[in-house]
Image (tube, rainbow, N blue to C red):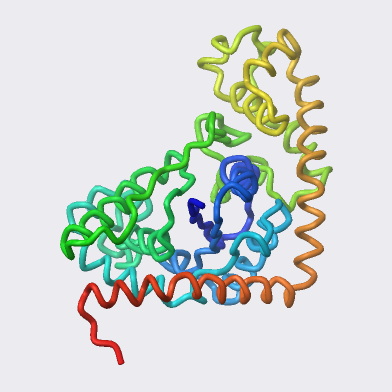
Amino acid sequence: MNRIFSGVQPTGNLHLGNYLGAIRNWVKLQGDYDCIYCVVDLHAITIPQDPGELRRNTREVAACLMAAGIDPKGSILFNQSQVGGHAELAWIFNCVARLGWLNRMTQFKEKAGKNRDNATAGLYVYPTLMAADILLYKATHVPVGEDQKQHLELTRDVAQSFNSYYGVEFFPIVEPLILGEATRVMSLRDGSKKMSKSESSDYSRINLTDDADAIERKIRRARTDPHPLPETRAELAGRPEAENLVGIYAALANSTVDEVVARFAGAQFSAFKSELAELAIEVLAPITAEMRRLADDPGYVDSVLREGAERARALAEPILRETQDLVGFLRG
């Protein structure tokens, strides 16, 4: 069976965009793939973190994944720092990757901003750690969004470079997994910006911890334009807020944008928002309730992550040992 690896940062406040853009797809992949899902706390510390908050966020993200449908018995669910092979393989890949590859990474430029010289080395070599995350388990596929395609290309470059240098066909050339029409959820306050936990207004996003009242209130206040919903999908062009809300409805209903437009053609946004809120609550309320139940039992969440890490190490250790042998490390 083909193997999938994917990870999510423990930064707290997971929102509707995280769910529709990634987590929901991870749930669907179980059964068809050998799935490894990781809370990437090593990646998180590329920027300053409060230790207590990092631990809380790690548990919260793990609880969210389970509440959304990740089965920790069938899939492997763990936090990255519990498997030391990630860091060791990342160092080996730091000695394979080229500075030119890393200099092209747009996410580093965006995150470092104008203070590039003050950015950490960890932020700069973040992509090689991502390559190690994937190749430590010889994953064959990675579900990717638009913002991760460049990092996956670097993972492929690293695997090819390692194989070529040591004259082997050891690491797989990972394939991106594109899951149908992309669900790109934008801010409820500005349809030109991606929904993000870093935006100052809480009304810009629906958090997976929001209760029914908060969801209804945020959707009711979501920015729209003064026109009714269009009669064709083509007419959504140039109407980013309308396009965003229609796309959210389609994703939550497991429908298509064309079908949603046909259903609500000519409707006023007040009526559409009412139905969208009802649908969002129906889909998200069970996840939120289960997240809260799991959050009240941190010992259980920790045990799931610990058992997942044991299973991950069992897969990773023989691959890492063979990598060490290929590199020429002397092992006792």
Asked if 292 appears above or below 21 in the picture, the reply is: below
Q: Which residue occupies 53% across, 57% down? A: 8
Q: Which residue is located at x 55 percent, y 23 percent? A: 240
**Residue at 17% in and 53% down:** 100
Residue appearing at x 68%, y 76% in the figure: 303
* Percent position of residue 61, x then y: 63, 61
Farthest-out residue, front = 1
Nearest the viewer among 37 and 103 is 37
Q: Is residue 123 left or right of residue 239?
A: left
Question: Total number of numbered labels?
Answer: 0
User: The C terminus appears in which quarter of the rendering?
Assistant: bottom left
Observer able to see residue 309: yes
Q: Position of residue 85 (x, y in %)?
A: 41, 74
Q: Nearer the viewer, residue 81 or 307?
A: 307
Q: Quadrant of residue 48?
A: bottom left
Quarter where residue 181 is shown: top right
Q: Nearer the viewer, residue 211 or 314?
A: 314
Q: Position of residue 16 (x, y in %)?
A: 65, 43
Picture coordinates of residue 36 (x, y %)? 54, 60
